[in-house]
């Protein structure tokens, strides 16, 4: 039996429990049938030496957007971790907000692949990402020991 999808309230609660998300100021913006949108305000302490948002901010947002979408999809019942992340940056962001909109593309028995659209506050495309997650426990809820 499939677990019911998590609500926005439940997702916001899980987001707040991760200190790194709090450090970045990540907020859940919207739920979609195939993913979620998260955002982060560009602050001076998140900028690099060139005065633009550090690329790691957009990468982290992409990662969080996919992780939250998977958490929602599995009703909070499956543990998962990032195994691959590729980001292509199109333009820098100096102010406002960065948005990451995830699209779950494939949910397999052990690997899940998603794409992420990265935009600024004016809806300009600032990059794109492909993120692969590995499910850490089986469908029966048995923890993966890591043994092959």
Image: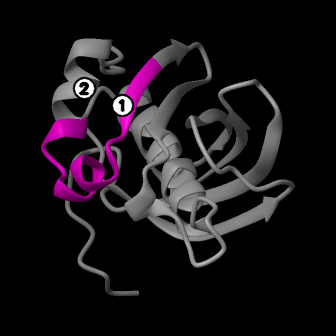
Task: Say which residue appears at 19% left-offset and 51% top-offset.
Answer: 18
| Quadrant the N terminus occupies | top left
Task: Say which residue appears at 45% left-offset and 20% top-offset.
Answer: 29
Report whether residue 38 is seen: yes
Mark 1, Cα crowd under 10 Å, few <14 / some 14-19 / many 20+, is many
Which quarter of the picture shows residue 70? Answer: top left
Q: Secondary structure at mark 1?
A: strand
Q: Is residue 9 left or right of residue 71?
A: left
Q: Is residue 57 left or right of residue 20?
A: right
- The question of residue 17 being in magenta is answered with yes
Residue 43 x %, y %: 43, 50
Residue 103 x %, y %: 67, 33
Task: Say which residue appears at 21% left-offset and 20% top-offset.
Answer: 10
Disc assigned to residue 12: 2
Disc assigned to residue 27: 1
Cα gap from disc 2 to disc 1, whole angstroms: 8 Å
Q: Secondary structure at mark 2?
A: helix
- Give the answer, above or below, for where 133 lies relative to 94: below
Residue nearest the observer in this picture, 35 or 109? 35
- The question of residue 24 being in magenta is answered with yes
Residue 126 x %, y %: 79, 46
Q: Are marks 2 and 1 in contact (CB under 8 Å)?
A: yes
Task: Give the extent of the magenta segment.
Answer: 15-29
Task: Say which residue appears at 45% left-offset and 39% top-offset.
Answer: 41
């Amino acid at each position: 039996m499939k677990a019911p999808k998590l609500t926005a309230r439940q997702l916001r609660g899980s987001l707040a429990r991760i200190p790194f998300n709090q450090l970045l100021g990540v907020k859940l913006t919207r739920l979609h049938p195939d993913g979620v949108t998260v955002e982060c305000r560009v602050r001076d302490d998140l900028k690099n030496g060139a005065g633009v948002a550090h690329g790691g901010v957009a990468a982290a947002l992409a990662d969080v957007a996919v992780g939250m979408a998977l958490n929602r999809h599995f009703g909070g019942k499956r543990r998962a971790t990032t195994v691959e992340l590729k980001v292509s940056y199109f333009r820098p962001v100096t102010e406002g907000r960065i948005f990451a909109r995830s699209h779950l593309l494939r949910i397999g028995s052990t690997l899940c692949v998603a794409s992420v659209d990265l935009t600024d506050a004016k809806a300009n495309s600032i990059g794109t990402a492909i993120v692969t997650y590995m499910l850490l426990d089986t469908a029966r809820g048995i923890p993966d020991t890591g043994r092959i």
